[in-house]
Image (cartoon, rainbow, N blue to C red):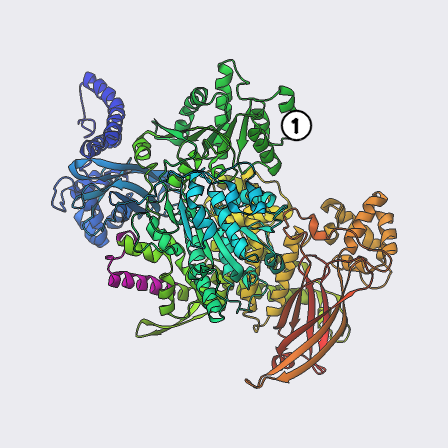
């Protein structure tokens, strides 16, 4: 007490004893605090934490917390403040008393603390006290489980001197009898201040009358304590009954029951179906009833889906099956398997994949029998089911027209992921599919084409959901269209929800707890038990160890190798000869993998190359290596057999929240489900290693499934906007009707308190849904996605989509993104016109304004280099700043890697240096470098200049970014075209095409254009360009670097060959390769251009029509082209095999207004010298063209722009006479 009170002790012996006590008291109090915390004793834990902090700071917890700002005020000030009592409990209200001073005027505070001039300073110190705003919601999961969602928002001013780099807080939930039900340690960092932190806690609900308390206590600041009471009296707990389907004791059905030799051939590896497949066979193969199957991993659910597919193709030979896989890796696995089994003889069905990495046109889709795709891709395609929107013929949504209505079977794998992050997309898919199905069924009924076999009582599209065991199958089944009304427990036709214990292969699960608050040390303590468990359960059989990160794969493998070496058995996990494994290792690129494979342990994560992953999978599948250490994504992706599965830790680092969070239970079940796979094993063993405090939770709930709840609210704005854009929803009433098709509406009624509805009565549910719709409409209106009619502060029924809203729907954007793009477009137009004017002032008028020199002839067109660079940089910066990249991960310490990368890229973290004509400075705020949008912009630049990336994670991040850029660029152009009547729009749309060229060529605006040709690298290109320009001097006309490629392309091959032979020191075969690439570029000629005009009868508007005849020629008269197009040299391009595209723009010469535009795909290359003619028709506003057409009767500018190749853009003048 004397030490804390800072009393002056005069005896030397007491001083010595006091120092001894003081040096140990805080440590002992901390240890006792953590003991009480683990034992759930709230009162003692709080008192011991107070004592520990008081010893550390030498301040009592009942004294004013402002005392901790030593040296900032005199002791008399603190004493004066402590003499003022606030609240009912005297002596324990110091924090409340300090906060109350903020409600006063500075002069009043000065008088109160007897420091007339110090009132403002005292208030400034109080604002630095670490205070949090606590918001919470309580959601009932089951009748006995509650989820607490807590948001902690720092509301204090961060000062490095007092707060350092981070502030820690203890949060715990206190229940009755003063016990701690759950506790968390939360850290706030200076870097992320003042962003809030969200926590999700799952707690038991013992008594609804019981009151909980959320208590937050600072880990280091004395007296900083906040308490919030939580009442459960308004919470309605849902029913706890989980209906399961009993597995019948049936004789296994032989595969000959298919009664079709072609179908039976698919299952030649076994003679009978397993018990689950036998029980479902009749419903699957002899009816069209929708089916929901809940069964454990490894129950043969894929074959269940195949039986429904065989039924569909038997009844509807031209029908299409769509298989939705939640992850790209799962889609690839299914595609790989089905292409072999279904795509080969005797079935020869066309199986296509549609994920983020692939693109198929309408023609390819129309020939598909089975489409394997991710939820997002199918959501985008199915938005075009009405086929009545022509505003975005170029967007992916156009591919859905006609094709969607041919779909007769929709299979959704892992449908229980409806409750996870991407669940809202799955919900939109099923809800829209049922709506489409009803539309198709009504159409067929009206045409009297109902199926005579009696299947017309079902919806036109059969929906099948595959899942693990479910806690609320009735809600899901009803949503899928299964009739569950009037049936007893588990008797609904098509509803099968088997217990988790119903596995074809028996499995035992062990759960082991490990102490330790910090993640990395706790993971390290698991390595030796992992080795011991492998020796005990699976010394000679395959083992998979699931870990949370790539770093953990390496650390775990290295430790297991060291323990095996300690046992003098380093080759324990090798199942082949040393010579064979060494020969395989020679083909492996990753150093860590090369080392671990030598000891029979493989690594598997996204950072490995495709070749390395394939080698590891093959070695493990063949039994040559017996241990595989993999990241958790493998559980959903590759189907590899294992006798023993170890889940090393149930947490992963979440980059969005910068903390460790738990895997969903569904992920843990998926991981342990890899043990004991059918066809490979007769039994399985799983070991789940968890933090000690979570052991009881996993023991209780691992096989007690939680109900699947809807996530639609998280994306309801995007879903409603999409339906408004395609015309499904035209009013608030339509929006309410749409919601009734969703799983969300069913769960609101079943568990109203989870979503915030007052009760499950029809009136309360409808009132709640209406509030959700109106709130969403207001948000969409704020972002300019829709136009609302508001009268007397109430939304009237009519809803109209805007161009912004259509852009969000057609290009699958966050509803806030197009408005960001619109701002970026307007700034880009100003920049382009400003720099064009500056360029004209320096270089004189552009030749494109000369209406006499290039009339009726296409001539080479280029832009000033500065205009190209500024517009390209700005467009990429705007795209990087959109909400689409909000969740690009910035991992621990990556802000420093971003700083290093910032040094190697041309523009830096933003475009400010480029716009001010200054080289960007290397020094940048660390907080800016920690922003995901900054990282995105740096990665795009690094890809363009081919800079070396600091770590392998950045390679995958770059791929993630580049996959999205073409879609976002097309969306931004779509938004820009809406403003086409604005001055400068013609030049801006030109820059979008030129930006596409640069991205496709993976080059910067100042890179040599000829480096696009095969066999010429960027380093050689500068020298070759100079030499070619010298050799062409005096041949007539000025040859610029921009027109060099066009000039070479127009030459005869023999002349181009002589030029290259004279200046390029390469073999003849290499020069031929360059020339083949050159002549693979299509040459565009303008054969005819006629202008006519007509008067629209309805509007009396004068419409001009430009009829163009373009000639497309590959190769030339002196040689044929057999080379690959230049775009094929970009390894990141997904369009190397796609046809070339042209953008044709028509603009006015004075104000540079865009009059009309069109996009066309060029015909495939042929080996004929004669060209292929293509007719194009452009309509434009006749009056606008004449008003802005200039002198001599007026004219327009025609530009033909390649979207894939730089240096081949052409321009012509079209007279209006």
**Quick check: can you spot residue 12?**
yes
Instruction: Kindly state the secondary structure of the residue where label 1 is placed.
Output: loop
Q: Quadrant of residue 698?
A: top left
Q: Quadrant of the N terminus?
A: top left
Q: Nearer the viewer, residue 196 or 674?
A: 674
Q: Is residue 775 magenta?
A: yes
The x, y position of residue 363, in whole percent, is 63, 59
- Using residue 872 as the reference point, say whether residue 1170 is left or right of it: right
> Is residue 200 one of those drawn in magenta?
no
- Measured as percent of width and height from the top left, residue 487 is found at 30, 52
> Mark 1 sits on what residue?
586
Residue 1066 versus residue 748 in the image, above or below: above
Relative to 304, is 402 above or below?
Answer: below
Residue nearest the observer in this picture, 86 or 601 = 601
Question: Can residue 881 be seen in this snapshot?
Answer: no
Instruction: Point out the image quarter for the C terminus.
Output: bottom right
Residue 883 appears left or right of 48? right
Which secondary structure dominates the residues rendered in magenta? helix
Q: Residue 148 at what x, y percent from top left?
A: 28, 45
Which quarter of the figure has residue 578?
top right
Residues shaded magenta: 753-779
């Amino acid at each position: 007490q004397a030490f804390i009170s800072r009393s002056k002790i005069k005896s030397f012996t007491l001083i010595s004893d006091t120092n001894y006590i003081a040096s140990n008291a805080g440590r002992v109090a901390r240890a006792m605090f953590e003991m009480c915390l683990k034992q759930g004793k709230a009162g003692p834990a709080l008192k011991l934490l107070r004592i520990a902090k008081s010893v550390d700071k030498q301040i009592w917890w009942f004294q004013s917390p402002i005392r901790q700002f030593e040296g900032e005020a005199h002791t008399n000030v603190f004493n004066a403040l402590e003499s003022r009592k606030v609240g009912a409990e005297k002596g324990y209200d110091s924090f409340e008393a300090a906060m109350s001073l903020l409600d006063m005027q500075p002069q009043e505070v000065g008088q109160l603390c007897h420091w007339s001039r110090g009132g403002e300073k005292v208030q400034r110190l109080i604002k630095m006290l670490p205070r949090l705003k606590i918001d919470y919601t309580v959601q009932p999961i089951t009748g006995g489980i509650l989820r607490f969602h807590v948001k902690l928002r720092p509301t204090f001013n961060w000062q490095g001197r007092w707060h350092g780099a981070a502030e820690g807080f203890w949060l715990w939930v206190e229940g009755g009898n003063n016990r701690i039900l759950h506790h968390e340690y939360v850290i706030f960092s200076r870097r992320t201040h003042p962003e809030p932190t969200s926590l999700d806690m799952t707690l038991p609900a013992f008594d609804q009358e019981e009151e909980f308390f959320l208590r937050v206590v600072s880990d280091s600041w004395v007296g900083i304590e906040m308490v919030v009471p939580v009442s459960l009296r308004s919470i309605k707990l849902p029913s706890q009954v989980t209906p399961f389907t009993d597995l019948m004791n049936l004789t296994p059905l032989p595969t000959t029951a298919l009664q079709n030799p072609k179908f039976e051939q698919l299952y030649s590896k076994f003679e009978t179906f397993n018990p689950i497949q036998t029980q479902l066979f009749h419903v699957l193969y002899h009816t069209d009833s929708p089916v929901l199957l809940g069964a454990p991993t490894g129950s043969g659910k894929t074959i269940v889906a195949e039986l429904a597919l065989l039924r569909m193709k038997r009844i509807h030979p031209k029908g299409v099956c769509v298989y939705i896989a939640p992850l790209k890796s799962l889609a690839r696995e299914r595609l790989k398997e089905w292409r072999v089994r279904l795509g080969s003889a005797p079935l020869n069905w066309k199986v296509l994949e549609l994920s983020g990495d692939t693109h198929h046109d309408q023609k390819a889709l129309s020939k598909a029998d089975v489409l394997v795709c991710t939820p997002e891709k199918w959501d985008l395609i199915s938005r075009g089911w009405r086929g009545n929107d022509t505003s975005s013929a170029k967007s992916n949504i156009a591919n859905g027209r006609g094709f969607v209505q041919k779909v007769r079977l929709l299979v959704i794998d892992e449908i229980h992921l409806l409750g996870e992050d991407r669940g809202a997309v799955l919900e939109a898919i099923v809800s829209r599919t049922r709506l489409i199905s009803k539309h198709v069924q009504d159409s067929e009924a009206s045409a009297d084409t109902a199926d005579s076999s009696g299947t017309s009582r079902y919806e036109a599209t059969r929906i099948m959901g595959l899942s693990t065991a479910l806690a609320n199958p009735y809600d899901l089944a009803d949503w899928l269209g299964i009739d569950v009304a009037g049936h007893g427990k588990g008797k609904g036709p098509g509803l099968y929800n088997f217990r988790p214990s119903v596995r074809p292969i028996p499995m035992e699960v062990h759960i082991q707890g490990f102490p330790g608050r910090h993640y990395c040390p706790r993971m390290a303590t698991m390595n030796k038990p992992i080795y011991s468990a492998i020796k005990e359960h699976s010394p000679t059989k395959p083992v998979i160890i699931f870990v949370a990160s790539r770093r953990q794969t390496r650390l775990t493998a290295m430790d297991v190798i060291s323990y095996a070496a300690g046992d003098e058995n380093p080759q324990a996990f090798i199942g082949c000869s040393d010579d064979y494994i060494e020969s395989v290792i020679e083909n492996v690129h990753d150093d860590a993998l090369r080392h671990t494979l030598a000891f029979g342990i493989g690594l598997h994560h996204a950072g490995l190359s495709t070749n390395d992953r394939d080698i590891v999978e093959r070695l493990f599948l063949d039994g040559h290596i017996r241990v595989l250490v993999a990241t958790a994504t493998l559980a959903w992706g590759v189907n590899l057999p294992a006798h023993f599965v170890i889940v090393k830790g149930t947490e992963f680092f979440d980059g969005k929240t910068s903390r460790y969070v738990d895997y969903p239970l569904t992920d843990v079940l998926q991981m342990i489900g890899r043990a004991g796979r059918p066809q490979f094993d007769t039994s399985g063993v799983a070991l789940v290693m968890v933090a000690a405090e979570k052991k009881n939770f996993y023991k209780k709930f691992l096989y007690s499934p939680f109900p699947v709840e809807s996530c639609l609210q998280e994306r309801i704005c995007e879903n409603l906007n999409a339906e408004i854009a395609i015309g499904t929803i035209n009013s608030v009433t339509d929006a309410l009707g749409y919601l009734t098709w969703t799983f969300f509406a069913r769960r609101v009624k079943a568990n109203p308190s989870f979503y915030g509805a007052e009760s499950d009565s029809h009136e309360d549910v409808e009132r709640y849904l209406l509030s959700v719709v109106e709130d969403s409409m207001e948000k969409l209106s704020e972002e300019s996605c829709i136009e609302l009619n508001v009268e007397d502060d109430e939304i009237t029924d009519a809803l109209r989509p805007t161009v912004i809203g259509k852009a969000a729907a057609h290009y699958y954007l966050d509803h806030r993104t197009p408005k960001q793009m619109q701002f970026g477009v307007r700034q880009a137009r100003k920049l382009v016109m400003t720099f064009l004017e500056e360029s004209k002032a320096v270089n004189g008028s552009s030749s494109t304004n000369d209406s006499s020199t290039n009339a009726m002839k296409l001539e080479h067109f280029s832009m000033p280099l500065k205009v190209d660079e500024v517009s390209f940089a700005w467009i990429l910066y705007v795209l990087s700043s959109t909400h689409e990249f909000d969740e690009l991960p910035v991992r621990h310490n990556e802000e420093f890697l971003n700083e290093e990368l910032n040094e190697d890229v041309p523009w830096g973290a933003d475009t400010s240096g480029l716009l001010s004509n200054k080289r960007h400075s290397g020094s940048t705020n660390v907080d800016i470098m920690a922003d995901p949008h900054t990282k995105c912009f740096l990665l795009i630049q690094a890809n363009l200049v081919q800079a070396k990336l600091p770590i392998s994670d950045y390679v995958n991040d770059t791929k993630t970014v580049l996959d999205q850029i073409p879609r976002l660029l097309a969306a931004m152009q779509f938004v820009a075209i809406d403003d086409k009547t604005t001055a400068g729009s013609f030049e801006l749309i030109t820059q979008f095409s030129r930006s596409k060229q640069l991205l496709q060529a993976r080059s910067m605006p100042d890179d040599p254009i000829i480096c696009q040709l095969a066999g010429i690298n960027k380093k050689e290109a500068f020298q070759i360009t100079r030499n070619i320009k010298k050799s062409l001097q005096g041949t007539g006309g000025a040859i610029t670097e921009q027109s060099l490629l066009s000039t070479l392309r127009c030459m005869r091959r023999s002349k181009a060959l002589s030029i290259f032979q004279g200046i390029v020191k390469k073999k003849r075969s290499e020069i031929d390769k360059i020339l083949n690439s050159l002549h693979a570029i299509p040459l565009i000629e303008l054969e005819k251009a006629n202008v006519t005009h007509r008067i629209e009868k309805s509007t009396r508007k004068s419409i001009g029509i430009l009829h163009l005849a373009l000639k497309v020629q590959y190769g030339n008269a002196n040689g044929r082209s057999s080379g690959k197009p230049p775009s094929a040299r970009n390894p990141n391009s997904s369009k190397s095999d796609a046809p070339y595209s042209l953008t044709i723009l028509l603009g006015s010469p004075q104000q540079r207004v865009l009059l009309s535009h069109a996009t066309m795909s060029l015909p495939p290359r042929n080996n004929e010298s004669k060209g292929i003619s293509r007719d194009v028709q452009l309509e434009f506003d006749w009056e606008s063209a004449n008003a802005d057409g200039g002198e001599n009767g007026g004219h327009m500018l025609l530009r033909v722009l390649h979207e894939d190749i730089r240096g081949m853009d052409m321009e012509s003048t079209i007279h209006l006479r």
